[in-house]
Image (tube, rainbow, N blue to C red):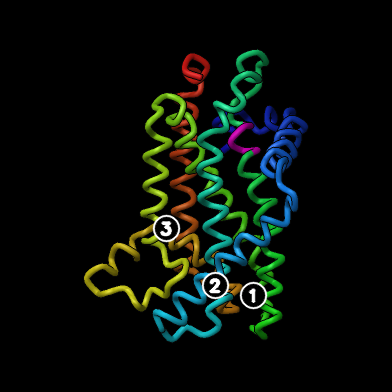
Amino acid sequence: MLPAVAGASELFVYRDLIATLVARDLKVRYRRSAIGFLWTMLQPLLTMLVLTIVFSTLFRFDLPNYPVYALAGIVFWNFFSQGISSSMGSLRRNAPLFTKVPVPKVVFPIATVIAGVVNLVLALIPLTGILLATGHPVRPAILFLPLAIVLVALFTLGIGLLLSPLAVLFHDITELIGVLLTVMMYLTPIFYPIGIVPDRYIWLVRLNPVRAILEVFRTPVYEGTVPDLVHLGAAGAITLVALTAGVLAFRRNADRIPFYV
């Protein structure tokens, strides 16, 4: 899909720029932080601790090893939501560069998502620690996780490509998407099991495309199995639609972006 935006060979030419942008995004994110990259690991752990106290103690439900279930969902959601938010701001942040140097604008949301993948991989360290500390079985299906991460990254990139030019053309989009992400978080079974959703609302959760991508990521970790072909096929189709829509939207609006930043 990316050749439709900038051409595979063109992106290869700018691979050093993408690597530089990824390194810069990672450094800027933690520039004024005393513990730097450790926040990538501590933040989901602290969130998981709060959710464990609230949901598995105050709102009791039968879900084995809730910390693993919740932490896997939190790690996924942090990557997805931060990837979307950062992608929407990537063009404005880099306007001084692409308005003076002829580089394909698509490298900026791509670099943002790649930086997010680095943070996602770092966040897997505390997730692995919780797996071992709680005695949760680690089965061979965990080897499917890299493929799941690729699927999650491509889905996030597709949404990011769709929204990043719109965030430049229409300033209110950023605020609107922030609200929609909050709503989407509660419609996605990140920290609650889908079984507690009342029957009259279950369709809202089942039709949520983000849920399908989440389960592809969480199933190998929590259930120790590879997602079934139907579920995997649905997640793949959703990712393809998101990436196609993102590519088309970005290509259509790319030439207008310099006039609005």
Amino acid carrying mark 1 in the image: Ala
Q: CA distance from mark 3 to mark 2?
A: 18 Å
Q: Are marks 2 and 1 in contact (CB under 8 Å)?
A: yes
Q: Position of residue 128 (x, y in %)?
A: 69, 72
Above or below for 33 versus 219? above
Q: Depth-wise, is mark 3 or mark 2 nearer the camera?
A: 3
Q: Which residue is mark 1?
A: 141
The image shows residue 138 at horizontal and vertical percentages of 68, 80
Q: Which residue is mark 2?
A: 219
Can residue 228 be spotted in the picture?
A: no
Residue at (39, 34) in percent of width and height: 173
Type of the residue with mark 2: Thr
Dots 3, 1 in contact, CB < 8 A: no
Q: Nearer the viewer, mark 3 or mark 1?
A: 3
Task: Tell me the quarter of the image containing the N terminus.
Answer: top right
Stretch in magenta: 107-111
Q: Amino acid at mark 3?
A: Met
Q: Is label 2 in a helix, a strand or a loop?
A: helix
Report which residue position mark 3 lands on. Answer: 185
Visible residue check, residue 135: yes
Identify the element where label 1 is drawn: helix
Ranked by sequence position, the earlier of labels 3 and 2 is 3
Earlier in the chain: of badge 3 and badge 1, it is 1
